[in-house]
Amino acid sequence: MSSSIVHAAHQAPTGFIRRYIFSLDHKVIGIQYYFLALFSVFLGMGLSVLMRYHMVYPDAKVSWFEKLWPTGAAGGIMTPELYLSLMTMHGTIMVFFVLTTAPQSGFGNYFLPIQIGAEDMAFPVLNMLSFWTTFLALCVMVAAFFVPGGAPLAGWTVYPPLSAVGPLAGPGEGLGQSLWIISIAIFSGASLMGAINFIATTIDLRAKGMTMMRLPLTCWAWLVTAILGLLGFAVLLAAGILLLLDRMAETSFFIPAGLVVSDQILNHKGGSPLLWQHLFWFFGHPEVYIAILPGMGVASQLLSTFARKPVFGYRAMVYAILSIGFLGFFVWGHHMFMSGMSPYSAMAFATLTMAIGVPSAIKTFNWIGTLWGGRIRFTSAMMFAMGFVSLFVTGGISGIFLGQPALDLYFHDTYFVVGHFHMIMGVAAIFGMFAGTFYWFPKVTGRLMNETLGKIHFYLTFIGVYCIFTPMHWLGIAGNPRRYADFTNFDFMGKLMPVHTFMTWAAIITASAQLIFLFNLFWSMKKGAVATDNPWDATTLEWGIPSPPPFDNFAGHHPVVNHGPYEYGVPGGAKDYLMQSDPP
Amino acid sequence: MESVWHGGASPYSIGSKKLGMWLFIISDALTFSALLMVYTYLRLSNPNWPKPFIFSPSIIFSSIMTFCLLSSSLTMVMAVHAMNHGNRKSTVRWILATIAGGLAFVILHASEWRHLILDEHVTPFHNEWNVPLFGGTFFTLTGLHMTHVVIGVIYLGIIAFAVGRGKFKAEDVEVSGLYWHFVDLVWMFIFPLVYLMSAKV
């Protein structure tokens, strides 16, 4: 055996702080990321429930609103500005600190090294720094709530001029908006560190026999996601620096001449708000895939495992992930059809957008092909994986509508868009996380999550999210604009308000149902049924080691891989599957 | 039958540190590309973009800066070469020469900034030619680049110190060299696009 020193192995730390706080162990860091995202997702969800409540009961006096926001909700009634700041923070926290953090940095950190047979990530110190930088970014972001003026109003896309001209533009556009930009700049740095680590680990630290075409699809998804993060966040960082300069150093990158804000003519001159949109969406579109690709990886892994069949078309799945990642960088213009775009550019962007439908459809067909004729084990993890496929298809089809400039001009800035991206980027990705949680929980804790609670949680969530987000498409077609705090003043909205009320109550019930998951998660850690090392009869390397895994994952042993990742349904043996590390 | 991957730390003959630096460079290149695109976009959309750099002294001065930085790339190559041959003393000397080139660049650049701000009254938000974004793009691009040079000087200082004390391997010097060459390369885009294209003819 050649010198297979995988990397400069570090010793297991003994002190509490080095073991659990500033840990270099990828498993601890993965859990830290997971809990950071868990905190963020409940915060973000809480904000969305407040928004939905205000939308249908704008005049309701809620005394604790006033306690939380003495100026934003004076007298207990939420102002439109407060609504916008809740919307901004909901979007930002969900996109950056949940969808970017949990599927990639959380699950990826924990399971990428184990699945490729490595002892740790390539750069453990960078890994720790990456988490604590993310944590700092979250603190700065949440701090925006507590500064004078409150949280920013400009949405998670922070379009200038609103985001660039300072406190003149409204409450929250002062220090709050600056903190937002600083937080995202810090987050970009954390993402860069994470991306370098993920790519170097996947390329360099694979165990003997783990060729690229034997990588589990989860690892492929994490690798391509890391590449997207490496390239995307670099541009967001540049854009953030420029926006911050516009606000702090009086430059005019994104502010045109002669702009009048709050009856004042600004001194700025020569900039262009469109420039921000180009820079932002060059990051923003790949960001959508950063959120969804890891979920695709988890879905592929789980559908195969629980259908007891190999993934249908493994290579096609790999090439589909790669082409989605590649094409994702050439479609940013489809977010800007309404911003004043030449029809020729719009056509090019529309064609490229449609092209992404091809690899996405390949993935969907292959998922269904994987399920076809399988002996499906309907565990909670599997239910969420199939839920992922369902939501991905639903959200994907409305994406085909929005990719057409002619249709997008109508749908843009209506609830159709809100329904679309919540289905595909929000809920589908979160179903991927639920699936991953149920699937890997026994590996992390040595105990199984409760299946009954899991099923109840699944059905409430699955039906709930369809009740929340499907009507948004109808409202969009009916012309319901987005980003409005209150629709009760518009005549044409009168007949649509019952739909909003229905969605609000669906949201409240679905949000409450998440407490079942939270209870299940913490209860199962202590009281769940004890799991065997491989409770799902799965094939990848993490299932060949004890639960929870030892400090260096393989206890000094170097695994050798002899099989592809999804060898299920193998005839003639005592078991119907071959683990990757089984002898050839 | 696929060839069996034997595992280990350097497929494609590239170690993790070097790969990590290359990945950082790719990402950083995107950041600079974005800023250069911004510069191009704004320059094209603002008519009467000023061309204030007269041949003497501005262009000559910035050419000397460029010469200092490019020479430091050559000395860095020599440092990597010396380290590959195990000659630590020579490596330290070449790295110190590289640092000198970088410092000369920073000092010249800072005096140029000083001249622009104090004598020509160019700031990020105002100038006498009534195109405020000239200063905005100039200071942002060159400022971010200068930050990279300063970080590079500190980075090389640490490498030189450690190599002199018998620590670090040839790969570590090479990795720092990658960063240094990248910073030089970025300047080779900034110099023509920002200086030469704004030369007064």
Image (cartoon, grey):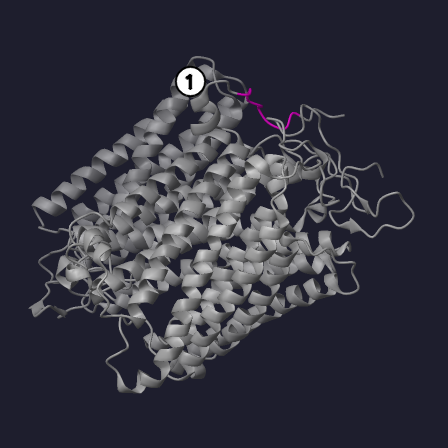
Q: Nearer the viewer, residue A411 or A458?
A: A458
B10 is within the stretch colored magenta: no
Q: Quadrant of residue A129?
A: top left
Position of residue A504 measured from the top left corner of the image (x, y, whole percent)? 38, 68
Position of residue A66 measured from the top left corner of the image (x, y, whole percent)? 19, 56
Task: Give the residue type at disc 1.
Answer: Ala
Name above or below for residue A169 compared with residue A16. Answer: below
Q: Residues within 10 Å of mark 1 (few under 14, many from 20)?
A: some
Position of residue A87 measured from the top left corner of the image (x, y, whole percent)? 31, 61
What residue appears at the point 45 percent right and 46 percent down from the top-left corner? A38
- On screen, residue A418 versus residue A304, left or right, reads left
Name above or below for residue A475 compared with residue A564. Answer: below
Q: Nearer the viewer, residue A449 or A223?
A: A449
Disc 1 target residue = B162
Name above or below for residue A89 compared with residue A61. Answer: above
What residue appears at the point 65 percent right and 39 percent down from the top-left corner? A529
> What range is drawn magenta here?
A5-12
- On screen, residue B84 versus residue B128, left or right, reads right
- On screen, residue A500 versus residue B196, left or right, reads right
Q: Quadrant of the N terminus of chain A?
A: top right
Element at badge 1? helix
Q: Quadrant of the C terminus of chain A?
A: top right
